[in-house]
Amino acid sequence: MKHSQTLIPTLKEVPADAEIKSHQLLVRAGYIRQTASGVYSFLPLGNKVLKNVEKIVREEMEKAGAVEMLMPALQPADLWKETGRWYSYGAELMRLNDRHDREFALGATHEEVITSLVRDEVKSYKKLPLTLYQIQNKFRDEKRPRFGLLRGREFMMKDAYSFHDSQESLNEVYDKMFTAYSNIFERCGLNFRAVIADSGAIGGKDTHEFMVLSEIGEDIIAYSDTSNFAANIEMAPVNVPIEKSDEAVAELEKVDTPNVKTMQEVSEFLQLPVEKGIKSLLFKVDEQFVLVLSRGDHEINDIKLKHVLDAANIELASEEEAREILGAEIGSLGPINVDSLEIIADHGVAAVVNGYCGANETGKHFMNVNPERDFKVSRYEDLRFIQEGDPSPDGHGKIKFAKGIEVGHVFKLGNIYAEKLGAAYLNEQGKQDIMIMGCYGIGVSRTIAAIVEQFHDENGITWPKEISPYHVHLIAVNPKNEEQMSLSESVYQKLQSNGMSVLFDDRKERPGVKFADSDLIGLPIRITAGKRANEGYLECKLRASGEQFDVHESELLEKIN
Ligand code: ATP
Ligand code: MG
Ligand code: MG
Ligand code: MG
């Protein structure tokens, strides 16, 4: 591509609103421009980078057995009402009405659309498992769109959805996706970690996030200094529930549980803030038991729990001990179970119902509490219960903290969506069964920003080879010099016919401007036709290392390959 022919509007000045390096550099080097807050245009160079990341994503998705399709961004509200997310998703969902006043949403995610589609088209176990994906713009009216491509309101996502007739099948595909994600971020050259995550508003249980380690990351990861254990601290403290989770209390009152306390009451009783994310466990306080029920089954919660207990001098009753003292089966201490609540009531135990929870053991929904709506979520600063140097919950090494950028997220959704939207199939025995699902997202445009965060120096971007918009930046120092121009032209042709992509700076600009732009744009190899052009010599410079050498035209290909 000739520079004179394309659009690369570079800037000397740092844009006033750009706080972080990737945002500054992508704007300054002419890759992106803001159209509205959190909404960006990808200029020709930016578009190339986007396509390169997409290519890696596509290749790894296909390897994992996923098949590409494309769904609409415009989605009828009815679908979102069927799953209840029209009401629970909140202000992040962009909503609009058509000319007939029918309600629509701009896709923030596509569980509703894909599940209803598969419900209508897949009727038999013989079509399962099935994994479909798309790469498409997503819309989220983020409270704080910022940091350029990192947190946009319209952004590019790869989202995949898998459908299964058994948990084993879901586990298999989940593992494949996990591997695909690792491959993708490795090919992007990123320093990342897969961490245990919070299932948040989407629901579901087993979930991991892929975090790029970076000081500007908005997530905090607790990880072991010696093992693979790593978890997002986002599943952090929640202090007091606001009105709506009284639903849960009301539900408990129905089963006649006079000793059930509200979260606030228990908080006062324990003289501690009650934390979200603590496992369902029994505390023994002054010979009284307090059962804390929560969605939590993440290992990270054990750390928090330990600190709650230590801080309050609380002895934790073992499950056996609890059964013995209560003289009854207490049911599972994991998922919320109405039976166990009755037992608790009978034995004068205060119960805290905390947080989200899916089904009880009989499959009946007990609550479905929405965390963003029902709780005030505070962040790491308030998380007093976990400290650097604590033993890692997997028993290996000590806890350390790092900041991370969430570039990918994989979930085992279970049958939450399939059940709500009636995605059933005929199983091998000819009986109707509900599908089991997984979903898998990658922030494609966010990944670009994460790459720039890790690949830059004081002069500009230093792209990894597979991501760079072109392989080579070819510069004719003085376009008026015939020898330089004809050597550049022939190198331009030769490199391209040998499969290398080239950006040819043929502009009538001062050399200083061209070199500064070249450093800013950040292609891996720079080739300059200058003083020694008359002898057929070119100057080569590797962007990342700064290594520089002269090479004769005849040896160029061999030297830079
Ligand atoms: P975050 O915690 O950063 O708000 P999320 O957990 O809401 O992200 P998911 O619903 O898991 O996001 O979406 C899948 C992926 O899409 C994320 O892992 C992230 O890489 C990307 N993503 C989410 N929101 C944005 C955004 N506003 N701008 C750019 N990329 C985003
Ligand atoms: Mg979000
Ligand atoms: Mg997140
Ligand atoms: Mg996420």
Image (tube, helix red, strand yellow):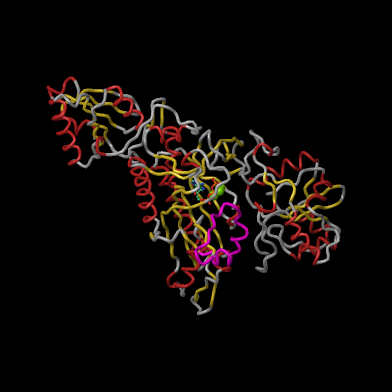
Q: Split into 4 quadrants, where in the image is the C terminus? A: top left
Q: Split into 4 quadrants, where in the image is the N terminus? A: top left
Q: Which residue is situated farthest in the front direction here? A: 99
- Left or right: 57 in relation to 138: left
Front-lying residue, 237 or 391? 237
Residue 540 x %, y %: 24, 26
The magenta region covers: 76-101
Residue 263 x %, y %: 78, 52
- Left or right: 359 in relation to 494: right
Report if residue 193 is visible in the image. Answer: no
- Left or right: 318 in relation to 443: right
Residue 161 x %, y %: 47, 60
Residue 521 highlighted magenta (yes or no): no
Residue 79 highlighted magenta (yes or no): yes
Residue 98 x %, y %: 50, 63
Tell me the residue at 27%/32% (across/down).
473
Report if residue 518 is visible in the image. Answer: yes
The total number of labels drawn is 0
Tell me the residue at 58%/64% (across/down).
416
Relative to 558, say whether 448 is above or below.
below
Q: Which residue is situated farthest in the top direction here? A: 531
Relative to 122, say whether 70 is above or below.
above
Q: Which residue is situated farthest in the bottom direction here? A: 430
- Left or right: 271 in relation to 16: right
Query: Which of the 4 image quadrants contains residue 45?
Result: top left
